[in-house]
Amino acid sequence: MISSDSLLSTKIGSGKFRKLFILFFALSIFLLAANIILSFFTPKEVSRNTTGLTASEIDSLFHKSVAEFYLGDEYLQKIKSPKKKEDSLLFSYRLTLPYDVPVPVFLQSIFGNFNGKDVTISSVEMILNKKSILKISSGEKEKFYTELLQDTSFHRDNGTLAFALTNYENLSDEELTKLLDIPESFAFLLQPKKESADFTKTILDSKKEYIVELTASSPNSEFTLAEKFPFVRNKLAINSLMRYYPRNNFIFVNQQSTLLSSTAYEKVRKEFTKRKYKLLSSDSFTNFSNVKEDEFENHFFNSVGMMSKGEVKLVVLPAVSFYNTIEKISNLKKRGIRFIAASSAVTRLNLK
């Protein structure tokens, strides 16, 4: 009996079937080779967005970031391209960043301005806290190169701001919570009453400050100072203020308070001085507390724009206006304007 394997071997091994097998094998090799050859000549779909941004467009967006930080021509200089054979690399710079503009902060602006653009951004720190290399490529070509040098010895001084916020009660609970969470330093201007005395713990826990402001009248008679009262009565009110607001080294007097024009003012001021507290008029500072909300931005930013080198301002403004404008106000730091605590500003102003 002949097995099936023996039969198959016999058939393939015979001349007729052997020729047929070789023919099919050769045909398959031919078809494979033909497919490979044709693939080189078959048109391929090419992406229409291979060029990306031009070098000039990248350069323009880079200068936008430089302008955001008010860095003039003295900070930026053109340098020779580090890659002579790179025809696409048209713009090469050396940008010196002052102490108040850290490299990561500047790069954050770069990434923001190029957000959504067809670019590849590379930033490598060559020398710790001193030198970084910024490269921008698009369309698979490097088109922009900048050396970022951090000069920690150079400090811009375009003025210093501090903030004292009035009427925090006009904020919602959610807004007040968000305001307390922001990193900027500011003080709350509190009218002496039980509610504000209770609020001081929240303020201090949030690493903020408070300053008590004496107004024309107080809802709590315990804190009221008036010319008509016997001086012993006024001293009791001062003691109450010290007890309920112990972390407050400055007392402001609202410009509309009758205390400012009274004969008792000088005696009251001396009593505060004995306790190492300063009694100051709110009108001694840049006061926007009575400016209409829709006019606030115009008044505020015009005032800040006129600040001179080394000038210190303590700005009194509504908490709502500060909350609604906080992003724009924070951007003032890009100009080289510094923010300090309200207590530091009062000390530096050295008001009597």
Image (cartoon, rainbow, N blue to C red):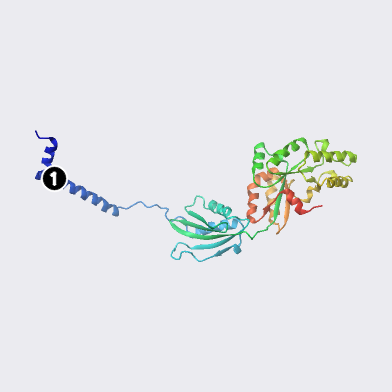
Report x, y in % for residue 103.
57, 55
Q: Which residue is mark 1?
A: 20
Report x, y in % for residue 62.
54, 57
* Left or right: 150 as drawn, with respect to 352: left
Q: Quadrant of residue 205?
A: top right
- Residue type pointed to by label 1: Leu
* Label tally: 1
Nearer the observer, 112 or 8: 8
Asked whether residue 337 is in view, the answer is yes
Q: What residue is at 12 percent from the left and 42 percent from the top?
A: 12
Q: SS at mark 1?
A: helix
* Left or right: 98 as drawn, with respect to 87: right
Report x, y in % for residue 87.
44, 64
Nearer the observer, 121 or 114: 121
Nearer the observer, 340 or 265: 340
* Left or right: 11 as drawn, with respect to 317: left
Report x, y in % for residue 210.
74, 43
Asked whether residue 169 is in view, the answer is no
Residue farthest along the right direction in this orientation: 230
Nearer the observer, 218 or 235: 235
| 255 in relation to 307, above or below | above
Q: Quadrant of residue 193?
A: top right
Quadrant of the rendering where the N terminus is positioned: top left
Classify mark 1: residues with Cα within 10 Å, few (<14), some (14-19) or many (20+): few
